[in-house]
Amino acid sequence: MFIEPNIRGDKRGWIEVICGSMFSGKTEELIRRLKRARIANLKVEIFKPAIDVRYDEVKIVSHDERAIQSTPVDNSQKILLMVGDVDVVGVDEAQFFDEGITEVCEKLALRGIRVIVAGLDMDYKTKPFGQMPNLLAVADYITKLHAICVVCGNIANYSYRKSADAGQVLLGEKDVYEPRCRHCYYE
């Protein structure tokens, strides 16, 4: 893999990964960090997978309706093509990206860019989801968030699917998924 040199002088980049189950606040935390970067007058660009149109075709929107403008892309390499002179790159729903997303994030970090990625670490069957294991492996900082189990009220880190659909990717909200703790998930 060819890595472009750090053209930003002594500025060092890194990769932050925010992970957890559905309804744990991943997108909300991503939006919070990106807005704080903008308050600090940093140049920010934000991307999301084009297939995620649950709340908005362009904006990243959290379940509590916080939103921030983003650029939808259909493959990870387009992020490299679209990133200009920025300080921070945000990526939401990373589990839906192709296998190149890890290399893209590493290239950006090596250019001196802070990369903040959010995504589900496990699918509804509790299996590692998409490229998230690879992103977690190369991350400099990891934040694992938890939801609250809708059955018992304990800490939840599983995304329970209420639908019988067997495909790994099924975009949905509270109508299709609910957060559950380990005990309630397996009952």
Image (tube, grey):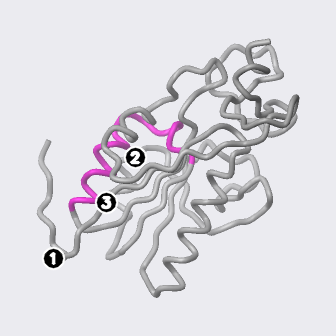
In the image, what residue type sits under mark 1? Asp
Residue, x 78% and y 40% (percent of image)? 148
**Residue 75 on image: x %, y %:** 43, 44
Of tags 1 and 2, the one toward the viewer is: 1
Which mark is first along the chain, 2 or 1?
1
Q: Is residue 30 above or below residue 94?
A: below
Where is mark 2, residue-wise? 76
Quarter of the image for the C terminus: give it: top right
Mark 3 lies on a secondary structure that is: strand
**Residue 110 on image: x %, y %:** 21, 59
Segment tinted magenta in the rendering: 93-110
Mark 1 lies on a secondary structure that is: loop
Taking depth in this image into account, of 91 and 33 the one nearest to the observer is 33
Q: Is residue 101 magenta?
A: yes
Q: Badge 3 local density, few (<14 within 10 Å), some, or many (20+)?
A: many
**Residue 133 on image: x %, y %:** 41, 32
Q: Is residue 150 left or right of residue 51?
A: right
Does the residue at mark 2 contact the one at mark 3 (Cβ under 8 Å)? no
Q: Is residue 171 left or right of residue 2?
A: right
Taking depth in this image into account, of 144 and 45 the one nearest to the observer is 144
Residue, x 82% and y 30% (percent of image)? 176
Q: Is residue 87 left or right of residue 173?
A: left
Residue, x 73% and y 44% (percent of image)? 23
Which mark is first along the chain, 3 or 2?
3
Q: CA distance from mark 1 to mark 3?
A: 13 Å
Q: Is residue 186 above or below residue 22?
A: above
In the image, what residue type sits under mark 2? Ser
Quadrant of residue 59 within the rendered picture: bottom right
Where is mark 3, residue-wise? 14
In the image, what residue type sits under mark 3? Trp
Q: Which mark is residue 10?
A: 1
